[in-house]
Amino acid sequence: MAWFRAGASIAKNAIKRTLSQRGVGGSSYLVSRARLLPSTHGRRNFHTTVFKNQAAPVPRAVPLSKLTDSFLDGTSSVYLEELQRAWEADPNSVDESWDNFFRNFVGQASTSPGISGQTIQESMRLLLMVRAYQVNGHMKSNLDPLNLEARQIPDDLDPAFYGFSEADLDREFFLGVWRMAGFLSENRPVQTLRSILTRLEQAYCGSIGYEYMHISDREKCNWLRDKIETPTPVQFTRERREAIFDRLAWSSLFENFLATKWTSAKRFGLEGGETLIPGMKEMFDRASDLGVESIVIGMAHRGRLNVLGNVVRKPLRQIFCEFSGGLSPEDEVGLYTGTGDVKYHLGTSYDRPTRGGKRIHLSLVANPSHLEAVDPVVVGKTRAKQYYSNDTDRTKNMGILLHGDGSFAGQGVVYETLHLSALPNYTTGGTIHIVLNNQVAFTTDPTCGRSSQYCTDVAKALDAPIFHVNGDDVEAVVHACELAAEWRQTFHSDVVVDLVCYRRFGHNEIDEPSFTQPKMYKVIRSHPSTLEIYQKKLLETGELTKDDIDKIHTKVTSILNEEFQASKDYIPKRRDWLSAYWLGFKSPEQLSRVRNTGVKPEILKTVGKAITTIPENFTPHKAVKRIYEQRAQMIETGEDIDWGFGEALAFATLLVEGNHVRLSGQDVERGTFSHRHSVVHDQTTGEKYCPLDNVIMNQDEEMFTVSNSSLSEFAVLGFELGYSMENPNSLIIWEAQFGDFANGAHVIFDNFLASGESKWLRQTGLVVLLPHGYDGQGPEHSSARLERFLQMADDNPYIIPEMDPTLRKQIQECNLQIVNVTTPANFFHVLRRQIHREFRKPLIVMSPKNLLRSKACRSNLSEFDDVKGHPGFDKQGTRFKRLIKDRNAHSDVEEGIRRLVLCSGKVYYELDDHRSKVDASDVAICRVEQLCPFPYDLVQRELKRYPNAEVVWCQEEPMNMGGYTYILPRLVSSMKAVGRGGFDDVKYVGRAPSAATATGFLKVHQKEQAEIAEKALQREPVNYPF
């Protein structure tokens, strides 16, 4: 109906103008009641209406004197008349859509029996009313189970708004036959107004409110119209209803059982929203029928135990055991079990049979209490599943996210995650969102929690359809959930089910909700449960007998009691903490030997040539061409390899070995500082070329993925974290545009990256690159807040672990690796080390900025290879150097060195440069490349090498930032171990404590930087801070 876009706006304004002049606005549109205006409590509080029946609404009688004018007045009426005259003279002179319109109404209305009095204006009014129901019918739907408040119904859902009276109800109207979906497409061009209104009320004003007319794609809208505007409501067979009842009984009786056995325990139960469980199960069954083989689920704590037990099939005895206090695995002494987490944060996985006879793999991702933080993690994990299963159509693996109403509207990560949905390297072919809408967020009413009418309005930005459904109508919930699955599999885009329910208890079971919602909880106390409502309906229709219902109740209760008894003797086995891809990988208590990361010279040469070659018919930017020519020279000579090329060599060699490499973040394709240029752009055609996509023959296009992300830290880091958790044989990297931007994602760092293995026994080898370094760019672009990551490290500063290379488990037993690397070769090795080991651990890299082009920060190819005798080869082979000793050829003991300066990062080059200028050859400078876990053995080696040296820690950052507070106690422990003193013997050189990370004045910065180098190398002893 393209003509709507030309005339609808004019027509609607004309209607309002005409009827306001007549004084017919604001009428009731139902005989059964007068319009109810919202209370002063707010117009958006609840999804409610007191509309009950499905009969056609009877328009209020309008005096004929009020209808003497044409409803289309002024210019709009003249416009229609001129169009009609032009069409009558020559049908080809008007747009095809108007030709269709006039053929329907002018050509047919005068000849059809019983409708001779119909005018074009009436026809348009009728079509506008149909459109109004499609757009705003949800405002009249019966959504709130509690019926607390009635919403104001839009005027355009009142037939009187269009000039129709009660006398018109049985009058026949010619609707025409339109090239669109829904009942307007049916071969019933003549219908009474009553039948039209009945169909519209049935379709749009029942227990489901549909929002889809904001979608710009006509095909999608027509598909939904066909599903919604059905001739008869969806009917379920007796067998199907019995299955739905059984699933609802499991959901309800499970919560009742927990409430009976553990009356004072917090469980964040599902009471009031029990229909979620049958809805999810039916959704999964339908999705499986449509080709889905694996579903990744993310949700907060409300209803999580019910989903774990009844949907994902976590053993009930294990859940009950956790309620009774839980036990760590007793039959496997010494195994790593971590700290554990509360029962309503845990995840699990299960292969579940479906109604159609298939099996579908379900995995519920563990998550913290931070609502919605798990959203991007689920989406990233789903994308990874699609890559590893070669699911290029994105139809076999699907993500489902359960949200709260307050958090869906209020948490920014929801919007960030939604906006990944259509990005080429982040899309998963659509996520199904289910909002468990309690109509209250903890104690906050919707009027204080959001500015929009619905909590789901944010999803309209994506053209996602939204199905609001009354949580007390289990069959409507099932239908909405099935429709969501069909939409996702058909259009491969997001869809939202807004399950409008309530919380029978407070935020948790020991909370008192009447403090803040007395009106709501007065109603809830006398409101029947969804199980009671559905049970009554099935008994009344005769589809189930009392015996049928009693059998189901008895079966469920009996199994729950059996599982409860079994839980008393239940001893947890070792937790299922690794998926199939992770078999053979070791947990922290199992020794994993250090491996070499050097690469054969011939492989380095071969891949080096491959990634420096640009097709002859490609025209890169002249500066980029020069960079690639310089890289080709580097690989040819084996000298002066810079940071960007060292990184590219790490990626290329891992690809050759069969590993997946993925790098994402803001502007990573070029690199914030123009150092990477992994994607080259043709300056003539605009085409793109990625050399790393062409390292091996017939390379999969996603095997190496580098992708600029949306301007998001929280969601994109969470996405990459989820991606990295699926398969260990991949190098997954997130790079911040500047290191300090990582603070927008600290929920992921704190609650997933730093503690996920301890809480949930889930490993990840995610690499995080955070540009860091003081070069005069001011407070916001100098520091990646190194101190925050070091503070999260869980190694004990006063206990030196086993450091023998053959027995060392230091990294395995620590939660993070944090490095500040100073050479391209060492960066190459630390990246490769992530893959060449039998466990995975997050790696935080303080990556450089001005070192990217520094002539001093270069490496030779001999530091990358595995040839014995080359500079990179030490006693064990070529690998990452946790500490780089002084560049001068010092012997094992140098008694003449007066000061040992330990530092990390690019400040080393400034210290070394100043040392040359002042000829301070009696000062040794060592670089601590790996800050965490602390290299006790190598630091002790240097302390022994310089027995008479004053020990100084030097850093660019202020004293209350950087590495100082982390390094100090560990350095002291090392010194005590070799008899070199204690805290008073460690001197500090760096900036004084500061609130801001750096000065904003370039001259002040330069002065401070110079003072650091001068003080670290001064002739007299360093006394600060003591």
Image: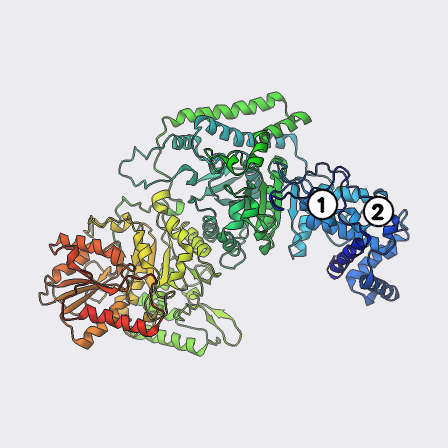
Q: Quick one: SS at disc 2? A: loop
Residue positioned 64% across, 37% down in the render? 147
- Front residue of this view, candidates 465 and 60: 60
Do we see residue 243 in this rendering? Answer: no
Image position, residue 728 (x, y; %): 37, 51
Image position, residue 404 (x, y; %): 52, 44
- Quadrant of the image occupied by residue 948: bottom left
**Residue 368 - label:** none
- Front residue of this view, candidates 279 and 862: 279
Image position, residue 927 (x, y; %): 23, 64
Exactly how many numbered labels are in the figure?
2
Q: Which residue is mark 2?
A: 62
Q: Which residue is mark 1?
A: 229
Q: Quick one: SS at disc 1? A: loop
Q: Is residue 154 above or below residue 738?
A: above
Residue positioned 53% across, 32% down in the render? 251
Q: Earlier in the sequence, mark 2 or mark 1?
A: 2
**Taking 183 as reference, is 525 left or right?**
left
- Front residue of this view, candidates 654 and 716: 716
**Taking 774 as reference, is 69 left or right?**
right
Quadrant including the C terminus: bottom left
For disc 1, the neighbor class at 10 Å (few under 14, some 14 to 19, many from 20) is: many
Amino acid carrying mark 1 in the image: Glu
For disc 2, the neighbor class at 10 Å (few under 14, some 14 to 19, many from 20) is: some
Amino acid carrying mark 2 in the image: Val
Tell me the CA gap for discs 2 and 1: 29 Å
Q: Nearer the viewer, mark 2 or mark 1?
A: 2
- Front residue of this view, candidates 55 and 113: 55
Quadrant including the N terminus: bottom right
Q: Is residue 704 above or below residue 315?
A: below
Outermost residue toward the top?
547
